[in-house]
Image (cartoon, rainbow, N blue to C red):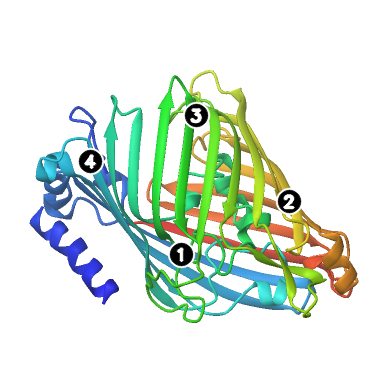
């Protein structure tokens, strides 16, 4: 019912007619998308305050040696996103709405072959389904310095985010590996958002933001479709981030932030039990740090050049397989003459096994993955991205040999 209602809202809004400033230049859909301006329909919608973005990703990946077994898979993700300026559309000043729906094609897992703790592919969900990822309203005030958002929300859209790491296919360059393992059904990150309220204040590059979300996004017993539930015992997840971010589109990256998060529900200890033999309940919380910089900008185009990022986070060492993870990477846009929109990158992520997990599983102390990739922008709407990953100590399992994964991503903007 929720899915049908939300889809009716989306298509009703689109048929009847992201926030855009009055003087912002409209996108050139004929150049930037495969399907173009839809006979002028996109321009008409834009003038009314609505944009529709359609994208598709296809990943072809193979575990060529090591890991759990050799094998290959094809994974696909199709997505529709609708941005609405409700000031233009309905006269609600400084109010925006956003709806994001995605469809997963293919229920095979490349990670079943590679056996990595951190994962291999950031569009892998383990099931073929369609579901709403986000659907929220946002109200701005104080000259847009203060904003309040409410609705179906994913914290990885704004928290623990470095833009430069988004080039890479491995999941920890989105939501970091140590936090991704937390909670009863993971935190509200791709592919599942959760009911939430988010407040943000930003001024002169400095910002502070906080969110309170449902502690269990979706339905742990049913990954199919969209489920919005507030069950007894779910609790909540609170996350706060403070930082400085002077990055702007087309300008050098400069962001540094620290964050704290905590679930209200406690989590089971891996080993210790009470007098009745039940696992002790531990505080479920963590801390993270991130930074990204443009280290060398091209003279003629500041969007081109060498950029880097570093991320580090911790969780309760008594509760989870990994008690911390860290990653760093370098990207270079316009590395080769005549290929100004291409981006090359190399990144490393390490997940460290907690002492209790090592005792229980006689595991290795950590897993490390190196990823090398090159995104070739063949057209404004089409990119091809070959990738190679080397996984050392997959899943911290001493019985698994180091794995090699190779493949390619094809991405299209319709």
Q: Position of residue 36 (x, y in %)?
A: 24, 52
Q: Which of the pair 83/334 is nearer the observer?
A: 83
The first of marks 3 and 1 along the sequence is 1
Crowd band around label 2 with a 10 angstrom C-alpha radius: few (<14), some (14–19), many (20+): many
The first of marks 4 and 1 along the sequence is 4
Q: Is residue 349 visible?
A: no
Above or below residue 47? Residue 192 is below
Q: Which element carries disc 2, helix, strand or loop?
A: strand
Q: Position of residue 300 (x, y in %)?
A: 49, 20
**Distance CA(mark 2)–CA(mark 1):** 22 Å
Q: Is residue 152 left or right of residue 406?
A: left
Q: Position of residue 184 (x, y in %)?
A: 58, 69
**Distance CA(mark 3)–CA(mark 1):** 32 Å
Crowd band around label 4 with a 10 angstrom C-alpha radius: few (<14), some (14–19), many (20+): many
Q: Position of residue 142 (x, y in %)?
A: 29, 25
Label 1 sits on residue: 192
Q: Which element carries disc 4, helix, strand or loop?
A: strand
Label 2 sits on residue: 325
Label 4 sits on residue: 95
The first of marks 2 and 3 along the sequence is 3
Q: Are marks 2 and 3 in contact (CB under 8 Å)?
A: no
Q: Are marks 3 and 1 in contact (CB under 8 Å)?
A: no
């Amino acid at each position: 019912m929720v899915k049908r209602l939300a889809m009716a809202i989306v298509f009703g809004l689109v048929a009847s007619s992201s926030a855009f400033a009055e003087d912002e230049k409209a996108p050139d859909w004929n150049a930037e998308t495969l399907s173009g301006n839809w006979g002028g329909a996109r321009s008409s919608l834009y003038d009314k305050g609505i944009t529709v973005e359609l994208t598709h990703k296809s990943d072809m990946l193979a575990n060529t040696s090591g890991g759990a077994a050799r094998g290959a898979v094809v994974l696909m993700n199709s997505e529709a996103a609708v941005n609405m300026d409700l000031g233009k559309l309905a006269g609600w000043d400084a109010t925006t709405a956003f709806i994001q729906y995605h469809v997963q094609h293919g229920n095979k897992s490349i990670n079943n072959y590679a056996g990595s703790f951190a994962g291999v592919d950031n569009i892998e969900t383990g099931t073929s389904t369609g579901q709403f990822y986000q659907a929220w309203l946002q109200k701005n005030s104080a000259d847009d310095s203060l904003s309040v958002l409410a609705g179906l929300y994913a914290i990885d859209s704004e928290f623990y985010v470095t833009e430069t790491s988004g080039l890479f296919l491995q999941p920890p360059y989105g939501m970091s590996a140590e936090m991704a393992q937390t909670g009863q059904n993971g935190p509200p990150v791709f592919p599942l958002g959760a009911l939430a309220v988010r407040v943000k204040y930003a001024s002169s590059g400095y910002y502070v933001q906080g969110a309170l979300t449902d502690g269990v996004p979706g339905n742990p017993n049913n990954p199919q479709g969209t489920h919005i539930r507030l069950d007894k015992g779910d609790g909540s997840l609170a996350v706060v981030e403070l930082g400085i971010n002077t990055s702007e589109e087309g300008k050098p990256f400069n962001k540094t932030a620290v964050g704290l998060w905590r679930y209200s529900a406690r989590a089971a200890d891996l080993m210790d039990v009470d007098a009745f033999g039940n696992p002790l309940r531990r505080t479920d919380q963590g801390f993270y740090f991130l930074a990204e910089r443009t280290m060398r900008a091209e003279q003629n185009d500041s969007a081109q050049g060498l950029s880097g990022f570093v991320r580090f986070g911790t969780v309760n060492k008594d509760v989870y397989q990994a008690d911390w993870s860290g990653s760093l990477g370098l990207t270079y846009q316009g590395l080769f003459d005549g290929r100004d929109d291409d981006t090359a990158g190399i990144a490393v992520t390490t997940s460290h096994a907690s002492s209790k997990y090592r005792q229980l599983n006689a595991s290795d102390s950590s897993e490390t993955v190196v990823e090398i990739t090159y995104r070739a922008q063949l057209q404004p709407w089409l990119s091809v991205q070959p990738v190679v990953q080397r996984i050392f100590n997959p899943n911290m399992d001493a019985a698994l040999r180091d794995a090699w994964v190779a493949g390619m991503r094809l991405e299209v903007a319709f």
